Amino acid sequence: MSVDRILVAITSDIYVRNYLRTDALSALFDNHRVDLIADESLALSHEVAKHPRFAGFYRTDATLDRRHHLLFSLIMWRNRKKSPTFAYRWMRNSGWDNVSAEHGVWKKTKAFLRWVPGGLMNPLGIRILVLGNSLIFPLAKKWLLNRLPVNDSLASAVKGNNYDLLIFPSAAFDSVSVDLSRLGKSERIKTLCLIDNWDNLTSKTSFWVKPDYLGVWGEQAVEQARRIHGFSSERIHAVGTPRFDSYFHTRGQPDPNPIYPFPYILVVGSARPFDEIGVLRRLEE
């Protein structure tokens, strides 16, 4: 495929750090005609605007984003047999994990009764079970798709500029990556989605519009893209990740003064729901 003109879309502040503050895209900028666009709501929008390839901001619609996320969650629930983490994500988002953690009929019943009001109010709770039912889901999906037009602001940035390729880092759970994939198909432009994290293909959702190509961390993600999302092997490329590059910016420089006058271990936390303090206490024992 001949590639002359490329559009890169930055949808999150973390991608500013991972892709613009590192040299991840340097070869792209050096060897091709590249335009850079970004979400106008980014906290780091001022930093993106200073980039020499910056071509403008696009806007997102909060209502459309909510509809996208509802559809993502329904498709995730429908495909939960493909990845156990899909079901776990619903449990965590809905608070059901608090019910399943209880032992004994009485405790579990009380936990369930406490959960029901929140499960009804939570847009990612009982609604997902109802609309994700095998009988109702086709109608719910059709209703949502009819109310999910392509983002006009993105369409304006893409159409008429003769792009050969659209590139966008993504966690596979955002409306912009879907709309860029849709625009790629309607405008006959190839699309490349750079999967940002190691677990995005197993823990978020299934693509309801696939980009032409995926860039993933390594062979495990290649297998997941094939098995869970149905991508053919020639469409998936293990390219690594720039996610950690910023942590090593002092590599090769003289050792800084130590924080403590004794050897120590840095423990990097994973996620708020996990009892990491308890784990450290066990290790200390």
Image (cartoon, rainbow, N blue to C red):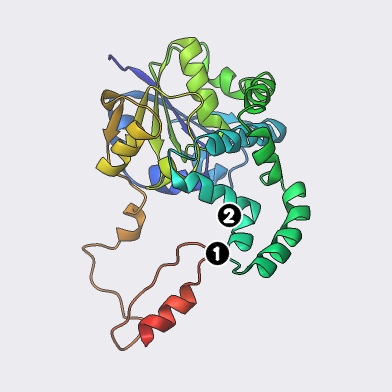
Q: Residue at x 35, y 47 (%)?
A: 22
At label 1, which amino acid type do we have? Answer: Pro
Residues 129 and 53: in front is: 129
* Frontmost residue, 23 versus 194: 194
Residue 160: % across, % down? 51, 10
Between residue 46 and residue 202, name the one nearer to us: 202
Q: Is residue 216 visible?
A: no
- Left or right of 17? Residue 224 is left
**Above or below, comparing residue 38 to residue 117 in the picture:** above
Q: Is residue 102 above or below residue 136?
A: below
- Secondary structure, mark 1, is loop
Q: Is residue 16 left or right of residue 59?
A: left
Q: Amino acid at mark 2?
A: Arg
Q: Disc 2 on helix, strand or loop?
A: helix
Quarter of the picture holding the N terminus: top left
Q: Are marks 2 and 1 in contact (CB under 8 Å)?
A: yes
Which mark is in front, 2 or 1? 2
Indicate the position of residue 190 as horizontal and vertical percent values: 39, 18
Query: Where does label 1 land, which residue?
Result: 273
Q: Residue at x 70, y 40 (%)?
A: 127
Residue pointed to by mark 2: 92
Q: Is residue 181 visible?
A: yes
